[in-house]
Image (cartoon, grey):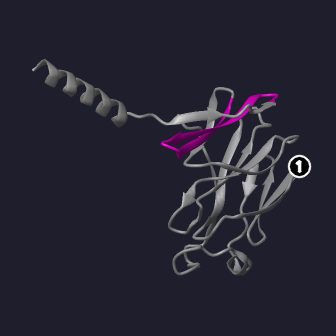
């Protein structure tokens, strides 16, 4: 009977520890700014990515399934990231503009609903920055505000279609800009 209890206790312990396996997270050294250290953390469970997040000191700015740095201007303290993959269109779901030069850091999700928001180029200026997604669909960042392009014929003819499905549905095609609140 004692042997059965021991085997059950060992099995139960292993089952509990496997059932509650936590993901393992690693942070880079980061980048020191006037408002604190800006760092990115990647988390994995069993070798598979589970989440990524960005922090300014202890303030978590954003969390997504994955975050990839696309471009930045360290002197202006502005960074552009792509978020996790939207499997329905086989493209990143969002692009994120992060501005940590402000006293209250700003995180803005943007793109075009119903299309691939693939990064194309950026022009970083002190007063005005332009971020283009394929193919030359331009978002303008000025005075802490990101302005989307108009929904017009130029947008419809130049935007990158989704990688899966039947292509672009013009009715669903909508540029968007959303401020992102810090996760808890």
Tell which residue pokes out farthest to the front in this image.
3
Relative to 148, residue 179 above or below: above
Relative to 47, residue 19 above or below: above
Residue that badge 1 annotates: 127
Q: Is residue 95 left or right of residue 77?
A: left
For this rendering, which residue is in front, 162 or 123?
A: 162
Q: Residue at x 70, y 41 (%)?
A: 106
Whether residue 34 is in magenta: the answer is yes
Q: Residue at x 61, y 45 (%)?
A: 180
Q: Quadrant of residue 120?
A: bottom right
Instruction: State which quarter of the image contains the N terminus.
Output: top left
Magenta stretch bounds: 33-56
Q: Is residue 26 left or right of residue 148?
A: left
Whether residue 61 is in magenta: the answer is no
Residue 46, percent from left and from top: 48, 42
Residue 66, percent from left and from top: 59, 49
């Amino acid at each position: 009977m004692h042997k059965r209890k021991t085997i059950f206790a060992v099995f139960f312990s292993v089952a509990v520890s496997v059932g509650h396996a936590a993901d393992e997270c690693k942070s880079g050294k980061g980048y020191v700014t006037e408002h604190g250290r800006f760092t990115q953390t990647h988390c994995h469970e069993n070798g598979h990515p589970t989440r990524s997040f960005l922090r300014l000191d202890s303030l978590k700015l954003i969390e997504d399934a994955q975050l990839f740095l696309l471009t930045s201007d360290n002197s202006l303290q502005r960074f552009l990231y792509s978020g996790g993959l939207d499997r329905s269109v086989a493209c990143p779901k969002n692009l994120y503009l992060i501005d940590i030069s402000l006293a209250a850091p700003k995180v803005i999700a943007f793109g075009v609903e119903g299309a691939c928001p693939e990064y194309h180029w950026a022009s970083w200026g002190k007063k005005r920055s332009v971020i283009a997604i394929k193919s030359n669909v331009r978002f303008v960042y000025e005075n802490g505000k990101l302005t989307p392009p108009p929904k017009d014929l130029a947008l419809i003819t130049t935007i990158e279609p989704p990688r899966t499905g039947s292509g672009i549905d013009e009715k669903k095609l909508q540029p968007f800009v959303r401020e992102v609140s810090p996760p808890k």
